[in-house]
Image: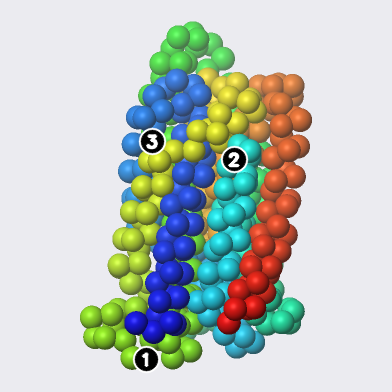
Amino acid sequence: MTTALLLLFVVLLVVLAFEYINGFHDTANAIATVVSTKVLTPRQALVLASATNLIGAFCGQAVAKTIHSGIVDDKVVAVTTLTIFCAMLGGIIWNLITWWFGMPSSSTHALVGGLIGASLAAANGNWNVLIWSREKVDKVTGKVSMEGIYHKVVIPMITSPALGIVVGFLVMGLLFLLIRNWRPHTVNSVFGRLQIASAGYMGFGHGMADAQKTMGVIMLTLYGATASGDLDNLPSWLGFLKIADKSASIPMWIIITCALTMAAGTYAGGWRIIKTLGHKMVKMKPVHGFAAETTAATILATTGALGMPVSTTHTITTSIMGVGAAKRSNAIQWSLVEQIVWAWVMTIPATGILGWVIYKFCGLFT
């Protein structure tokens, strides 16, 4: 086995490790509310989230295409297996740090930041390697759309949390009008059942949004390895690894592998973050959990269909904030919110620096 092929397999394992960690790191996004309201036990919630994550991962490829062709311009510098390795390692390190401290940071932005930093390092600081904004023309329909970091990452990074807060506030306000004459027991009974559906919907949205991102990274890795000639002398039984067309549909083996890995990671759980989202930030009952999960899942499903790699963490956390604000402004622990926001702000710069440093370090030995 050649050194290049061995490195490729190592990189694929690292990418899947990121997917697994993403699963348990973001488990709280899907089940924190349903656990905190005591509608489901933690174990029941994990089974539900794992199953719906798996289903969601099979739905759509728009986000994956953004990751593997809409962030880095491979005409400026080839995206090699080493680039992907350093990007993923930076994201993994940041995810583990924030998980340890119970901060619900974004795995999406950790991935994007690591990819930006490692690609910049590979291009020796040439910022043209990053696709900031450009038009994309559909070869079949002729439809013109915009792609690049500005349209697919920056704008959603700002608008999705804003939507989470506003829509969460409005949905909760409407529910308050609907149930204002209901007995508390009836409210808890009805929305306890509805929250099981909304938690499943949230798990589906998480699988649809996050599993696709790693599919895109694997596609980018295999395309880069194919283009550089690293896979030229593969034995016939490994021919499925070659990706010669960057715009091709994603092979089923990649979809299945990413879906199962994320589901396994989800089942492993992420109790530190569950405690932060489900108990510390705002106290919730089933009706509040239903409102937050329905809001967040709808945003994720919509942006996923548009190919925007939106942060599941940002979306559900701000939806919880909006729901809490609808109860009363002091229902939210704003000091904790401030800590979470700082984690969000730091994610892309921190993982970008990590990706850069790791790439330069690896360069000393190659």
Q: For mark 2, what is the residue? A: 100
In which quadrant of the rendered image does the N terminus lie? bottom left
Which residue is found at the position 57% from the left and 48% from the top?
96
Q: Gap between marks 1 and 2, in whole Å? A: 42 Å
Give the image quarter of residue 260.
bottom left
Q: Element under label 1?
A: loop
Q: Gap between marks 1 and 3, in whole Å? A: 43 Å
| Residue 219 visible from this viewpoint | no
Q: Residues within 10 Å of mark 1 (few under 14, many from 20)?
A: few
Give the image quarter of residue 174.
top right
Q: For mark 3, what is the residue? A: 46
Q: Residues within 10 Å of mark 3 (few under 14, many from 20)?
A: many
Which residue is found at the position 62% from the left and 57% from the top?
109
Q: In this picture, is 60 found above or below 69? A: above
Residue 230 left/right relative to 106: left
Q: Element under label 3?
A: helix
Q: Position of residue 326 (x, y in %)?
A: 66, 26
| Residue 345 visible from this viewpoint | yes
Q: Amino acid at mark 1?
A: Asp
Q: Amino acid at mark 3?
A: Leu
Q: Residues within 10 Å of mark 2 (few under 14, many from 20)?
A: few
